[in-house]
Amino acid sequence: MLGLQLPTDPRWANLAAISLEEILTDHAYCEQKAATQCISLIQRYPHYPALVDALSPIVTEEWGHFRMVLAEMRKRNIPLGRQRPDLYVNALMQLQQKGGDEAGRLLDQLLTCALIEARSCERFRLLSEGLTDSYWQNFYRRFMESEAGHYTLFIQLAKRFLPEDRVNQRWQQWLRWEAQIISTLPVRGDRMH
C-alpha cells in the first residue's frame, strides 16, 4: 500500500524496543513538526481553499498526537529533552523544488509529507508488531492507522491540484530518492526516521 521501495532494516525495531524512551522523545517532536508543517503549508498556500480545509484538522490531530506522546512520557517521568536533527527529513527537503512554478513546489512539498507519513506508518507498524507489551502494541497501532490516512490525504491533495500523470511520475521519482536516502542512513534505534 505504501509503495516504499526499501523497507526499514529489521534491526531498527529491535533497537527501538531497547531505546523506547529515546523513541518517545523523537516521536513527540515528529508529531510537533508534522503539525508545524501543515501550518506552514496553509500559510504558504492560502489561495488553495481545499488544501486549507483538508490540513486544518490534521494540524489539530498531529498536535493531539504530540500531547498523547507527551502524556506517556510524563507518566514515566521521561523529560521531553531537546529536539534533535532529523537527517531523513532534512535530506528529503534538500531535494524539493526550490524555484520554478508554484505548482511544482507545492507538489514536492505534498509528496515529501506523504513520504514522511508513509515511512512513519511503516515504523509504527514495526513497533506495533515487534514490541511485546500489548499496551505499546495498541499505542503504536493507533499511530500507524493515523499515518496511513495522512499519507493518503497528501497524495490525494497533490492529485487534486495537479494532473495525475505528473503526480504519479514525480511520486515514482520521490520513491527512488527516498530509498537512496534510507540506504545511506545509519540504523538507529533512538530515532523514528
Image (cartoon, helix red, strand yellow):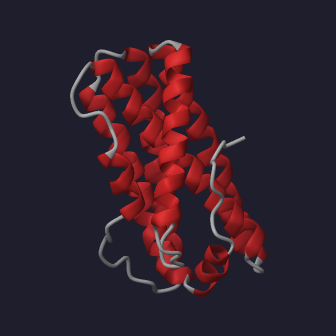
Question: In the picture shown, does residue 168 fall above or below 21?
Answer: above
Give the quarter of the image for residue 107.
top left
Question: In the picture shown, does residue 163 fall above or below 1?
Answer: above
* Rendering coords of residue 144 (x, y %): 66, 54
Report the residue that reaches farthest toward the top: 163
Question: In the picture shown, does residue 120 fall above or below 80?
Answer: above
Left/right of residue 14 with respect to residue 155 in the rendered view: right
* Rendering coords of residue 99 (x, y %): 21, 28
Left/right of residue 44 with respect to residue 15 in the rendered view: left
Left/right of residue 17 with respect to residue 171 in the rendered view: right
- Give the mark count: 0
Report the residue that reaches farthest toward the left: 99
Q: Residue at x 55, y 29 (%)?
A: 155
Question: In the picture shown, does residue 162 fall above or below 134?
Answer: above
Q: From the viewer's side, name the closer residue of 118 and 38.
A: 118
Q: Residue at x 53, y 75 (%)?
A: 187
* Rendering coords of residue 120 (x, y %): 56, 56
- Answer yes or no: is residue 143 visible: yes
Q: From the viewer's side, name the closer residue of 107 and 36.
A: 107
- Answer yes or no: is residue 157 visible: no
Q: Residue at x 65, y 74 (%)?
A: 13
* Rendering coords of residue 104 (x, y %): 34, 23
Q: Residue at x 29, y 75 (%)?
A: 82
For the N terminus, the image quarter is top right
